[in-house]
Amino acid sequence: MQSLRDVIKQAEKDKIAVGHFNISNIEGLLGIFKAAKNLNLPVIIGTSEGERKFIGPKQVGALVKSLREESSYPIFTNADHCYSFESVKEAINSGYDAVIFDGAKLPADENIKTTKQCVEYAKSVNPDVIVEGELGYIGGSSKLLDEIPEGVSAENLTTPEQARNFVVETGVDLFSPSVGNIHGMLKHARNPDLNIERIKEIKKAVNVPLILHGGSGISDKDFADAIKAGISIVHINTEIRLAYRDAIKLSLQENPDEIAPYKFMRPAVEAVQKVVEKRLKLFNNI
């Protein structure tokens, strides 16, 4: 079975993208796993700091590891958006396959300093752990939005020069820029278009795979163009949360007397699976 590093390298070579989907519970995990397995595609399971706190970082690792070993299947864990070195350290010590230090709101020198510290710690504990750095603020939460997050604008996109310097100074394995993407989905409008030319420019400027955060709400065309331009992993969360919530709501409305969670939660698993299958097909040109 391929390692996560091998999976990402292959995606980069084939100009496709690995799907990264966040979970808050086992229902989300099962929906994602079923979708990936149906399509025979590798997948990354992400958990934010809030999601890790809710499930437990070691518990996430144990759940994913059990699926990987039982099925001999390439499913991996990523500690999404760690906002401190301590958070990164906890995830690495809990056995995550990859971690992200998100210092996008910090001054550039502080972001570089802490990201480099995370890289050095990961190498000292387990050289196989993949470390991602982020430069360029895109908002801070996967939720439904009334407006574009404050501090996010087309004028503040990551530049190729910034990207090159950041990657060289920190030694990260993966890099996520701001290229028009935002966290969350706008309620009353579609999300902004991605700057595909900027993705191409950054890809030429750095020697590591590029990651697209804030994938929910992006048009299929932008996804396809971004992957062709050099994106190797795409993060999806808000779309999953929305499908999950709506499925449970409908399930309980249709079965108001049902009290067995495994029965009224089944539609939520199916809804997550449907979203993930759709995205994985797009990311892999299926």
Image: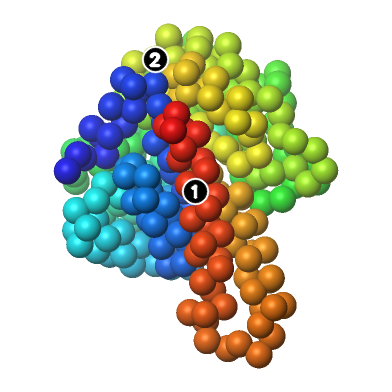
Q: Secondary structure at mark 1?
A: helix
Three-letter amino acid code at the position of disc 2? Val
The N terminus lies in quadrant: top left
- Residue 91 or 251: which is nearer the viewer? 251
Count of numbered circles in the view:
2
Task: Estimate the x, y position of residue 270 in percent, counting from the top left.
Answer: 51, 62
Q: Residue at x 46, y 67 (%)?
A: 27
Three-letter amino acid code at the position of disc 1? Val
Callouts 2 and 1 close, C-beta under 8 Å: no
Classify 248 as above or below 165. Answer: below
- Residue 190 or 71: which is nearer the viewer? 71
Q: Residue at x 45, y 29 (%)?
A: 285
Crowding around mark 2 (Cα neighbors within 10 Å: few <14, some 14 to 19, many 20+) is many
Q: Secondary structure at mark 2?
A: loop
Classify 219 as above or below 49. Answer: above
Classify 259 as above or below 31. Answer: below
The C terminus lies in quadrant: top left
State the image quarter where residue 225 is shown: top right
Crowding around mark 1 (Cα neighbors within 10 Å: few <14, some 14 to 19, many 20+) is many
